[in-house]
Amino acid sequence: MAHVSDSDWEGVRLHIVTGKGGTGKTTVAGALALALATGGKRVLLIEVEGRQGIAQLFDVPPLDYNDRRIASAPDGGEVFGNALDSEEALLEFLDMFYNMRRAGSALQKMGAIDFATTIAPGVRDVLLTGKTKEAVRRKSGDDYVYDAVVMDAPPTGRITRFLNVNNEIADLARTGPIRSQADAVMAVIASPQTAVHVVTLLEEMPVQETADAITELQEAGLPVGAVIVNQVRVPLLSPTEQTRALEQTLDSAQLAIDLESVGITPTDDVIAALMHEAAAHAERVALEDRERFTIAELRIPTYELPFRPDGVDPGTLYDLAELLLTQGVA
Amino acid sequence: MNNAHAVVPKSSVFDVDAMLADTSVRIIVCCGAGGVGKTTTAAALALRAAEQGRKVVVLTIDPARRLAQSLGLGHLDNEPRPVVGINGTGSLDAMMLDMKRTFDEFVESAADPERAATILANPFYQSLSSSFAGTQEYMAMEKLGQLRSSAVVEDRWDLIVVDTPPSRSALDFLDAPRRLGSFLDGRFIRLLAAPAKAGGRAYMRVLSAGFGVFTSVLSKILGGQVLTDVQQFVASIDTLFGGFRERADETYAMLKADDTAFVVVTAPERDALREASYFVERLDGDDMPLAGLVLNRVASTSASAIDAATATSAAARLAVLGADTSAAILRIHAQLVATQDRQRRLAERFTSAHRHVPIAVVPTMPADVTDLTDLRTIGQALADG
């Protein structure tokens, strides 16, 4: 099932996926990586928060700092995974500039590693985005090693600070290698090669956070990609039924007759419960329509993925990837 | 047991009202992963306790705009303010943590005005008090300590409910203050402050790779100005606070006391439940008092007699008969039951590993919290278990 539709993100090599906690950004990042790899491409999927979310999603052993193949994509593509670790990145960085890897354990004892990777503002972020930038630009001969890199990034509340590394380390390092590293990172992240996608649900708070994050990203000059709406309820009622359900005027007597006809005993409790569930569904669909309108006003490309009552396993991930492809994401 | 509690049939019910009524419980800490409804749970618990007659203060960290408004927290001034519209004889005060303000006040209370001014103007201090990782957690603990002493000394409150900062890991609330404390008291900052002096021969031995290289790397990476700022900062805070680490340890010890109850908040999702597991295990390991788990936003049905397969096949037959509306209603039910089944499977993984943890189940609410009435509804759901 090769797709001939043009990608909306031609030329983008780094896809950064953020979203409010609980919106399913790891799932969306995984589906996006599969979609981008479809048709014989090599894609690297990176996580930066030490949660092992990718390993869980793809049902593979825990990932580490080395790229490992985690899935095949349709038509010969491959997805690799990496759980970036700021301490490894720091040692690599020290090694690169000062041949100081050997001093690692001494630095550890003094609390210097802890300081740089967990306490000092921004240093950890420069290290993680720096390693990501390196993966984006890694070459073997004349060709890039990866056709695209997808990052399962920190949540919306922290994303602008995380990506805007220049600003973040301004107080701490005005000159020196960390500073140059930050400049090199910004040259990739703030370029048309990068797109920051925001995952949301059609609920008030996630949509509000999405709008806030997009404003912040734009103000920081970072390239906003798409809004990916996750877990969209498929309306199960027709427009007329939807209106009646909201008005609570669906015909409960008819429902009782119909249930009886297929062998379900229509007790008053069952009828009341089902009518209540229909009303709640209609309310949810109405809420989603309102939130969808708010998202449309943001005027940026939007894709939708359906709610899966059974949850997401490695199999359904391919369905989600397919849906992203048909909508033109890749 | 309500319908939602069918999601975790094997666990015991977390009796929220009993916890709120127990006057020996004076601090309730709400923890959990981001996006599970921690702040809302904290606010709902605080309101319910107040309306049952207790004198409550709730410390929120980063409330959503409308929740803040519903508590009357229009502006942020780092002081508890009374919430208007509480029923009954109790009272509720609410505040939002301003971490920088809390740190500044901490400095102002410990130093004479001149020295305090020097510290507050120091660029390294400004960075430390506004953007260091762990500062928010440290200051949340600091504020909790302050609230506790005014609760005890002035008899202003008999219950403090705390929300915890949104962080990568729920464990950060417990660990970050001590990590920051160790840094501020540690060898490394002293080395940063005065490489040549503090380094001395001891560090020469530790750093076999070459002490000279190390210090020159530091000044190259961080820049000379930073080292000067750090030096001035360390000189001015020296002996001022009796140890940041010690202070963090004291607050940590306070959380182990009998009058504290931890409430772990989670949602029936894989990641959130995993975080909850880590946290519960940690509380166990450190002998910290876990009151119970709140499983938030759970799908529930009162027509559980009709399972998903029955509903789906009945819907198909009704559709053939032209009874489209009834078919649609059954499909809605089937989807709900499938969701509930998935949530039960996820929740069961947690309950089988943590059988002793009592659980309160809160059903999905149709819309976000916008006022005290919504918070009361959540409080009622919490109490219904």
Image (cartoon, grey):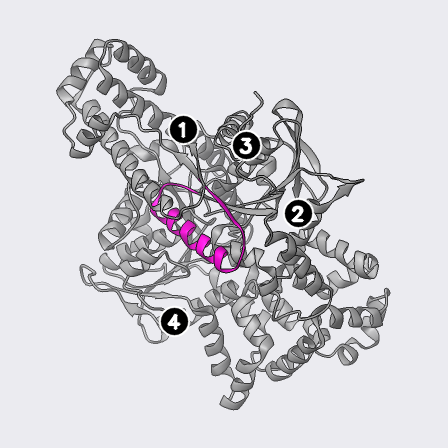
Q: Can residue B1 be seen in this view?
A: no
The image shows residue B336, relative to residue B221, as above or below, that is above
Residue at the (65%, 61%) spot, across then down:
A123
Residue corresponding to mark 3: A6
Image quarter (top left, top right, bottom left or bottom right) of the C terminus of chain B: top left
Residue at numbered disc 2 = A84
Q: Residues within 10 Å of mark 4 (few under 14, many from 20)?
A: some
- Point out which mark residue B265 bears: none
Front position in the image: A21 or B90: A21
Q: Does the magenta stretch include residue A209?
A: yes
Q: Find out whether residue B196 is within the magenta segment.
A: no
Q: Is residue B378 left or right of residue A328?
A: left
- Is B383 or A19 nearer to us in this picture? A19
**Element type where label 1 sits in the image:** loop
Q: Which of marks 4 and 2 is in front?
A: 2
> In the image, what residue type sits under mark 4?
Asn
Front tag of 3 and 1? 3
Range of residues picked out in magenta: A200-228
Question: Disc 4 designates what residue?
Answer: B78
In the image, A66: left or right of B46? right
Sequence-first tag of 2 and 1:
2
Q: Real-space Cα distance between discs 4 and 2?
A: 37 Å
Circle 1: residue type: Pro
- Front position among marks 4 and 1: 1
| Chain under callout 4 | B
Other residues around mark 2 within 10 Å, as few (<14) / some (14–19) / many (≥20): many
Which residue was labeled with disc 1?
A309
Element under label 2? Answer: loop
Cα gap from disc 3 to disc 1, whole angstroms: 31 Å
What separation in Å lies between label 2 and label 3 (alpha carbons)? 32 Å
Look at 78% across and 72% down and name the residue there. Answer: B215
Instruction: Give the secondary structure at mark 3.
Output: loop
